[in-house]
Image (spheres, rainbow, N blue to C red):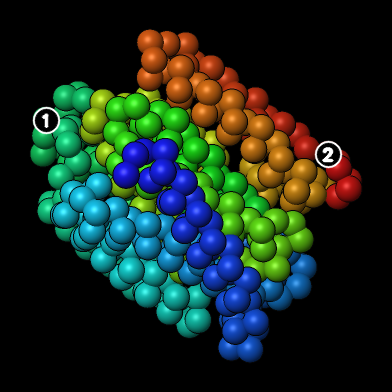
């Protein structure tokens, strides 16, 4: 099967499973009472079903499994699929019963450790800047942080789905000519995320929930680490840069004030923008524009314009954060 046909199949399967699956699960979530009530972290005004992330995760895993069976992906990556399923199960229980932070974190640590030990990445993630043992430790910490920041950033209609879609598109463009197998999974990620967005765009009919955001953070984190290990570290840094910056800066501020960083809050830049009056859709549209620019920066950075791409990406994210921090619009903006 040529790459074009494989990409088309991945997009069709992942998008269909995610879009249809998400729509089908909404009434079941309502009947089961799986709804997110407004709290100190949320930005919504009424209880809304959460757990819709089952759809996009299922779509991505199905394509990934097919790629494994077809020999497109290394056989060892079956452990990545198993890890995502385990995290989805634990996260589903968290969505239903609100598990303790330790109960949520321990499985994440175990899955990341096993994945790094048993699934080859292809090279050092930090490009020989660190000795290999330290490289793997740093990679594990970065992966664990990415899993959780992806969850932290899942707090506005359409935000996480559009971010995942943008990262998926970026992976396709960066990898298509050098690593078609990774481009295939990137296409599935983008399509599954867009399928979910059909039900999650403002006003959202369903939220992703931990069952979606945690496994997605794990899978996307793996893909980004693979990109970096294969030498495309600039793209691996640039594509998720907005989420990385918003979550990391917010956490650092809270830690500097001596606050409990694991506690729910509404201090992320995107949350502050919505609280200031910017509508969910208007805020996400600004993030989408920035992400499109980041995709272009990632592509350029891996094609001979490394420094320029990195500098431009940092400027784009800095401007976006300032725009969100200074938002003073009505909800119809």
Residue at the bottom extreme of this rendering: 31
Quadrant that contains the N terminus: top left
Q: Where is residue 116 in the image (x, y as percent from the top left)?
A: 18, 50
Asked whether the viewer can see residue 325, the reply is no
Q: Residue at x 61, y 66 (%)?
A: 207
Badge 2: few (under 14), some or many (20 or more) residues near its Cα, within 10 Å?
some
Q: Residue at x 57, y 20 (%)?
A: 315
Determine which residue is flagged by label 1: 131
Where on the picture, by quarter, is residue 113? Answer: bottom left
Quadrant that contains the C terminus: top right
In the rendered structure, find residue 47 and report the number of the disc placed on it: none
Q: Element at badge 2? A: loop
Lateral position of residue 225 relative to residue 327, left or right: left
Badge 1: few (under 14), some or many (20 or more) residues near its Cα, within 10 Å?
few
**Above or below, 273 relative to 60:** above
Asked whether 19 or 228 is in front, the reply is 19
Q: Where is residue 221 in the image (x, y as percent from the top left)?
A: 36, 46
Determine which residue is flagged by label 2: 328
Lateral position of residue 58 relative to residue 51, left or right: left
**Above or below, 32 relative to 153:** below
Q: Residue at x 36, y 38 (%)?
A: 3
Distance from disc 1 to disc 2, alpha carbons, whole Å, reads 48 Å
Lateral position of residue 283 relative to residue 174, left or right: right
Q: Where is residue 270 in the image (x, y as percent from the top left)?
A: 66, 45
Q: Position of residue 13 (x, y in %)?
A: 47, 58
Asked whether 328 or 199 is in front, the reply is 199
**Above or below, 268 relative to 232:** below
Lateral position of residue 124 relative to residue 208, left or right: left
Q: Element at badge 1? A: loop
Residue at the front extreme of this rendering: 1
Q: Which residue is drawn at 63% across and 89% down?
A: 31
Task: Work out whether mark 1 precedes mark 2 in sequence or the reverse, and give the earlier one.
Answer: 1
């Amino acid at each position: 099967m040529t790459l074009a046909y494989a990409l088309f199949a991945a997009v069709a399967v992942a998008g269909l499973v995610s879009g249809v699956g998400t729509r089908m699960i909404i009434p079941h979530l309502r009947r089961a009472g799986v709804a997110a009530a407004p709290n100190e972290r949320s930005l919504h005004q009424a209880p809304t079903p959460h757990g819709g992330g089952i759809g996009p995760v299922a779509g991505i895993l199905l394509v990934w499994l097919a790629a494994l069976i077809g020999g497109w992906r290394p056989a060892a990556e079956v452990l990545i699929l198993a890890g995502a399923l385990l995290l989805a199960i634990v996260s589903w229980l968290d969505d239903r019963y609100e598990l303790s932070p330790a109960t949520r974190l321990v499985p994440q640590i175990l899955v990341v450790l096993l994945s790094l030990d048993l699934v080859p990445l292809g090279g050092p993630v930090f490009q020989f800047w660190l000795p290999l043992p330290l490289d793997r430790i740093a990679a594990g910490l970065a992966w664990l942080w990415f899993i959780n920041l992806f969850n932290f950033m899942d707090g506005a209609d359409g935000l996480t789905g559009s971010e995942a879609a943008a990262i998926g598109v970026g992976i396709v463009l960066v990898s298509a000519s050098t690593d078609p197998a990774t481009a295939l999974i990137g296409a599935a990620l983008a399509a599954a995320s867009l399928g979910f967005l059909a039900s999650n765009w403002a006003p959202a009919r369903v939220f992703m929930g931990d069952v979606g955001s945690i496994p997605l953070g794990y899978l996307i984190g793996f893909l980004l680490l693979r990109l970096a290990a294969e030498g495309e570290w600039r793209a691996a840094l640039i594509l998720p840069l907005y989420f990385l910056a918003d979550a990391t800066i917010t956490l650092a501020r809270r830690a500097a004030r001596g606050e409990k960083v694991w506690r729910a809050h509404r201090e992320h830049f995107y949350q502050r923008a919505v609280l200031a009056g910017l509508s969910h859709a208007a805020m996400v549209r600004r993030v989408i524009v920035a992400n499109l620019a980041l995709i272009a920066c990632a592509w350029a950075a891996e094609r001979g314009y490394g420094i320029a791409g990195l500098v431009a990406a940092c400027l784009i994210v800095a401007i976006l954060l300032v725009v969100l921090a200074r938002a003073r619009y009505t909800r119809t903006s």
